[in-house]
Image: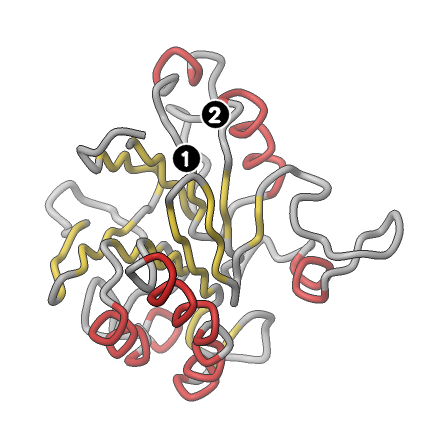
Amino acid sequence: MKILCVSDQIDPLIYTNSLKQRHADVDVILSAGDLPMEYLDFIISTLNKPLFFVFGNHHTKEYGQYKQGRSPYGSGVLETFPYGGIHVDSKVHYENGLIIAGLGGCMRYNTGENQFTDFQMFLQIAKLLPALFFNRIFRGRYVDILLTHASPKGIHDKNDKCHWGFKSFLWFMRAFKPRYLIHGHIHLYSLTEKRCTTYHSTQVVNAYSHYLIDTGEPS
């Protein structure tokens, strides 16, 4: 299975007419936040593959509608409307054998949208627990991928408070053992900066700009 991860930067290698030729074999797309919905719409329309996303702390124009489950064109849960991607923030989603959980937002550093203290993020994790235990009982594992915007504490994070990682993500990885934690928020300015780190049994991946994961398993 091939997973295209995007985050934080509109990448000219993705936002191009040659995207279909370059990534035609991708099975699923994950967006770790801070990207305009129109960009995600372009990726979905071009590759015609499922896309799962969380919001970061920028490009949050549609955040309120998705978070509250409101559609501007009527009542009902706003999951795949209007851009086609599936919003997985504070949810666990199962599709085609893949279990994806989402936790958007970053560490609280001002009064902006989608920011949390570490305790508040732990409360967001608590919302996932019933679905995680259901998966463990009926699917044999809790989750395959945790999709976040912020990074875990001490892994790829920075010294300024805006870019601190969450300690609660470390607990999540120890307790539920996702195969991958895919995050954004931490910009990479050099090829020498670390993009992938192993924590216990989880591969932590910084999806900044774009990154392709090949799980080595059939889709």
State the residue lying farthest toward the front: 138
Q: Is residue 189 above or below residue 213?
A: below
Q: Quadrant of the N terminus?
A: top left
Relative to 65, is 176 on the left or the right?
left
| Residue kind at label 2, given as amino acid type | Tyr
The residue under label 2 is: 15
Residue 74 percent coordinates (x, y)? 89, 51
Disc 1 is placed on an element classified as strand
The residue under label 1 is: 28
Relative to 32, is 50 on the left or the right?
right
| Residue kind at label 1, given as amino acid type | Val
158, 114: nearer the viewer: 114
Q: Nearer the viewer's eye, disc 2 or disc 1?
A: 1
Q: Is residue 115 above or below residue 103?
A: below
Q: Mark 2 or mark 1: which comes first in sequence?
A: 2
Look at 35% across and 35% down and name the residue there: 4
Relative to 1, is 42 on the left or the right?
right
Q: Residues within 10 Å of mark 1 (few under 14, many from 20)?
A: some
Look at 47% across and 74% down and name the residue there: 130
